[in-house]
Image: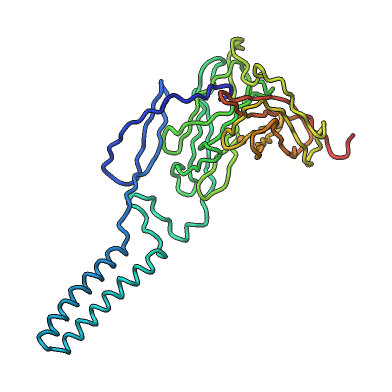
Amino acid sequence: MAGAALAAPDPQYVQLRVERTGPHELKLSAGDETAVIPFRVLVEREPAGEFLVYGGLLAAAVLLVGGLLTGATARPGKAMALAAGAAAGVTVAAMVIVFEPLLPAPPPDGAVPTPPPSAAQGRPYAQARVETVPARPEAGEEFTLRVDLIDGSTGRPVDDLTAHHEALAHVVVTSRDGRYFRHVHPLRTRSGRLEVRLSAGRPGRYRAHAELEREESGGQLLTADFTVGGNANTSEKAGAGREAGVTATPRLQPAAPVAGRPATVELNTPAGVRPWLGMTGHLLTREQDGDFFGHVHEMGAPGARVRFTFSFPEPGRYLAWIQYATADRIVTVPFTVNVTAPGTR
Ligand SMILES: [Cu+2]
């Protein structure tokens, strides 16, 4: 959320009672928004080795005592057999003590079933449908952007997104002129469904880019366009507008980047920048008239500037935004880049 206050309220604790191991869902509501968060209850299983160690030692003890008693009543053959049994029990126990640390621990009760080795080839990309609810939002009115994810090979909802950069999915919504920019993190509202509430003050074409990643699959980029109808709502605060107090302008090197060649983008940052979404700085860019969407990071520690290296793929006009976080807010700096064709001067 651009410009949103980050101060977290005091943590609140609540005790949950669960009676079964395995998958559960936790429903969290704030106002009229609800997120459904899956979690698993795991209970450590007694390692199998423990049974063998104690079993082996107990058997050894019983047999030894038996051997001694038998020996005392002068039946050496039987005593020897019992002593051998005791030795075997001690050996089993000793073997387990020595080798147990090398054995893999059993999965806890309630864990996700381990797929057979043949399934370890990776999972297919999610089939996605991105839509708005209502289908044609009105300017100035709140609407829901919804992402439904299906596994094409099973037809079932995809519920195995891995968090990357500290979110299940990153959604960037922009208007064609770049004046509207939102980088949001949708909530999981049910299995295979992510939703986020948005509103746009002006009618027109908007584009949503969603970045997500399934477990054992790769990163995916989904793109969808939608139209906002109605009349311009002049009361909208400029989402992509320069934030108050931000005077730094991004510097490009070369000033007119060349398609397919790395360019650097640098921006001075104030004191007190802190990592946000796992990174010091984020550069997001979209081709104004094409489909391209790019997202790279400043990987270094926070300092007096953020610096990105980026190769714009084609000549043309690009909308770009640099985002970083200070102690209390997210700063978004919009700019445009004109990329020239190689060989033109
Ligand atoms: Cu990023």
- Please give the count of numbered marks on the rendered protein: 0
Q: Quadrant of the C terminus?
A: top right
Judged from this view, the residue extending furthest toward the front is 72
Along the viewing direction, whichever of 77 and 220 lies nearer the viewer: 77
Q: Is residue 61 above or below residue 254?
A: below
Q: Residue at (32%, 64%) from the top-left corner?
A: 49
* Quarter of the rendered image showing ligand 1: top right
Q: Quadrant of residue 34?
A: top left
Q: Is residue 186 above or below residue 244?
A: below
Where's residue 104, x and y in %?
40, 61
Judged from this view, the residue extending furthest toward the right is 345
Judged from this view, the residue extending furthest toward the top is 234
Asked whether, in this view, residue 333 is left or right of residue 89, the answer is right
Along the viewing direction, whichever of 24 and 317 lies nearer the viewer: 24
Where's residue 197, x and y in %?
50, 24
Asked whether, in this view, residue 208 is left or right of residue 339, the answer is left
Q: Residue at (72%, 28%) from the top-left corner?
A: 268
Q: Is residue 64 above or below residue 243?
A: below
| Residue 296 in view in this figure | no
User: Which colour assignment does the render follow?
Assistant: rainbow
Asked whether, in this view, residue 126 is left or right of residue 288, the answer is left
Along the viewing direction, whichever of 165 and 155 lies nearer the viewer: 165
Where's residue 294, x and y in %?
67, 36
Q: Is residue 36 above or below residue 133?
A: below
| Residue 222 in view in this figure | yes
Where's residue 188, x and y in %?
45, 34
Q: Quadrant of the N terminus?
A: top right
Asked whether, in this view, residue 308 is left or right of residue 254, the answer is left
Along the viewing direction, whichever of 218 and 333 lies nearer the viewer: 333
